[in-house]
Image (cartoon, grey):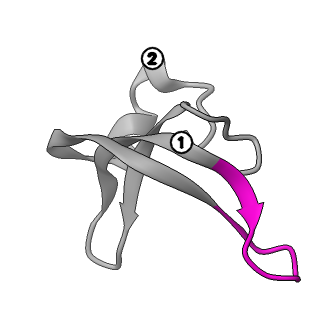
Amino acid sequence: MKSMKLNDLCFFYHSGARARCVVGVVTVSQEWYKTDGEGEGVVDVKEVGTMRRMVDLKEMKKDDGLKGWGFV
């Protein structure tokens, strides 16, 4: 998250127990900042849009066009 820059477009990934998939696209509205004194931090994002359908991580890993992306 520290490498995310202002206005970067990012996938919004739902990591719940039942569904692990991309559900939307967001843009970075505030770069990484600390939330406490122990190095924990967050990145603020703003919604760009929702996916027409949820896309599973397994499906994304099979897509050659996404090879080399941070989480793929």
Indicate whether residue 69 is drawn in magenta. no
Q: Is residue 9 left or right of residue 24?
A: right
The quadrant where residue 50 appears: top left
Residue sticking out furthest to the left: 52
Residue sticking out furthest to the right: 38
Amino acid type, label 1: Val
Residue 3 numbered mark, or none: none
SS assignment at label 1: strand
Closer to the camera, 18 or 26? Answer: 26
Quadrant (top left, top right, bottom left, bottom right) of the C terminus = top right
Q: In the rendered view, would you say 2 is above or below 63?
A: below
Task: Indicate the position of residue 37 as horizontal and vertical percent values.
Answer: 87, 82
Neighbourhood count class around disc 1 (C-alpha, 10 Å): few under 14, some 14–19, many 20 upward: some
Task: Indicate the position of residue 70 as horizontal and vertical percent values.
Answer: 63, 38
Q: In the rendered view, would you say 65 is above or below 68?
A: above
The quadrant where residue 13 appears: bottom left
The quadrant where residue 21 appears: bottom left
Residue 65 numbered mark, or none: 2
- The residue depicted at 54 percent of the width and 55 percent of the height is 44
Spatial CA distance of label 1 from label 2 is 23 Å
Closer to the camera, 35 or 52? Answer: 35
SS assignment at label 2: helix
Q: Is residue 43 left or right of residue 53?
A: right
Residue sticking out furthest to the top: 65
- Ranked by sequence position, the earlier of labels 1 and 2 is 1
Q: How many marks?
A: 2
Q: Is residue 43 left or right of residue 48?
A: right
- The residue depicted at 62 percent of the width and 35 percent of the height is 6
Amino acid type, label 2: Gly
Residue 28 numbered mark, or none: 1
Span of residues in magenta: 31-42
